[in-house]
Image (spheres, rainbow, N blue to C red):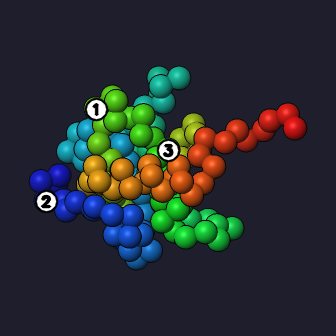
Amino acid sequence: MAAEMRTVRTLAELAELTSSGEAPYLRYSPGPDSDAHHSSNDHESGLTMPGVSVNPLAAPGWWTLPLEDWLARRVCQYLRELDEGARPWLLSGRQVDFGPDNEPLVVDIRPVAWIAPELLDEARERYQSRLNAGAATHRDR
């Protein structure tokens, strides 16, 4: 599976794949070959979930900024996973439930593409320069 995947190098390319519906999800993991052998686990309860947890890429209806801004935010949401040896990749699949963080759980996974390091760099730069990255949801005013 993974050997046949192309690599997406820019947020513009990612926006095209997301808009077309070809790659509606992002996942950070060792890759599709590893994920084909098991579902995701809920780390707090130890329970096995009925699919693989993914990060949806489609922007919600209320989002009026460029799609690339939304995608930069989504890509940056799980960058910490890189430190644990995960790689970001794009996929499609059939949603069957939700995980503990309300993330979609999918089965019938179809790997689409790897995310290149230069896309990660572009996403970091865009997220930090165009959005209030890491702003607290609630704070005393």
42 vs 13: above or below: above
| Residue ID for mark 2 | 4
Q: Nearer the viewer, mark 1 or mark 2?
A: 1
Count up the numbered dots.
3
* Secondary structure state at the residue bearing disc 2: helix
Q: Does residue 43 appear to the left or right of 14 in the view shown?
A: right
CB atoms at circles 2 and 3 under 8 Å apart? no
Q: Amino acid at mark 1?
A: Gly
Which structural element holds mark 1?
Answer: loop
Furthest residue in direction bottom, as rendered = 20
- Which dot marks residue 13? none
- The residue most toward the left is 3
Relative horizontal placement of residue 16, taking residue 102 as reference (left or right): left
Where does the image place residue 105, in percent across and percent down from the top left? 46, 48
Other residues around mark 2 within 10 Å, as few (<14) / some (14–19) / many (≥20): few
Q: Specify the amino acid type for callout 3.
A: Gln
| Mark toward the start of the polypeptide (2 vs 3) | 2
Residue 120 vs residue 102, the one in the foreground? 120
Q: Secondary structure beneath disc 3?
A: loop
Nearest to N terminus: mark 1 or mark 2: 2
- Residue holding disc 3: 77
Q: Which residue is mark 1?
A: 85
Which amino acid, mark 2? Glu
Is residue 125 visible from the viewing direction of this image?
yes
At x 28%, y 49%, the residue is 117
Q: Earlier in the sequence, mark 3 or mark 1?
A: 3
Residue 139 on image: x %, y %: 80, 35
> CA separation, marks 2 and 3?
26 Å
Q: Is residue 117 left or right of residue 102?
A: left
Q: Residue at x 64, y 67 (%)?
A: 63
CA gap, disc 3 and disc 1: 16 Å
